[in-house]
Amino acid sequence: MGDDRVFVYEQDKPRLRGGDDVLDLIGEAGYRGATWVAVPVGRLPEDFFSLRTGVAGEIVQKFANYRLGLAVVGDVADRAAASESFAAWVREADRGRQVWFVADLDELRTRLGRDT
């Protein structure tokens, strides 16, 4: 996608369960030369969407440590409506370059094209 190589974690893959799964995903993406990883909403652990658990911070930090962007692909509107802190984090994250919340891969492609 543009100047960025995106590794897409397919919808039919298992849900990520924790740090080891995330590191395996990062390793596979790095092996393939990716600069971004696109993960469908349904493949993230449910605790990711409850910021007080720290799961989202742990996952995003792992991506940052390996200099990979994380694109969460899919609709998070219900989760954002249920938690003002999550909604605020989504808005703030979308202003940066580490983690983005996008509706689909076309939106990711568009955002990456604008960001280069």
Image (cartoon, grey):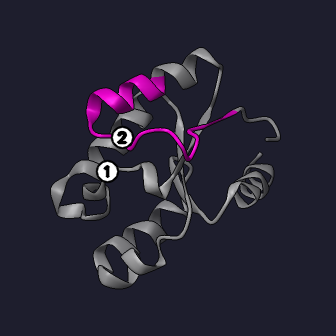
Q: Residues within 10 Å of mark 1 (few under 14, many from 20)?
A: some
Rendering coords of residue 86 (x, y %): 34, 71
Q: Residue furthest top?
A: 31
Rendering coords of residue 15 (x, y %): 38, 44
Residue type marked 1: Pro
Where residue 45 is drawn, which disc sits there? 1
Q: Residue furthest bottom?
A: 81
- Measuring 34% from the left and 42% from the top, which residue is drawn there? 59
Q: CA distance from mark 1 to mark 2?
A: 6 Å
Q: Residues within 10 Å of mark 2 (few under 14, many from 20)?
A: some
- Measuring 29% from the left and 26% from the top, which residue is drawn there? 20
Where residue 16 is drawn, which disc sits there? 2
Q: In the image, 82: left or right of 114? A: left
Residue 17 to residue 82: above or below = above
Rendering coords of residue 81 (x, y %): 38, 84
Quadrant into which the C terminus falls: top right
Q: Foreground residue, 113 or 18? A: 18
Q: In the image, 9: left or right of 21? A: right
Residue 102 to residue 21: above or below = below
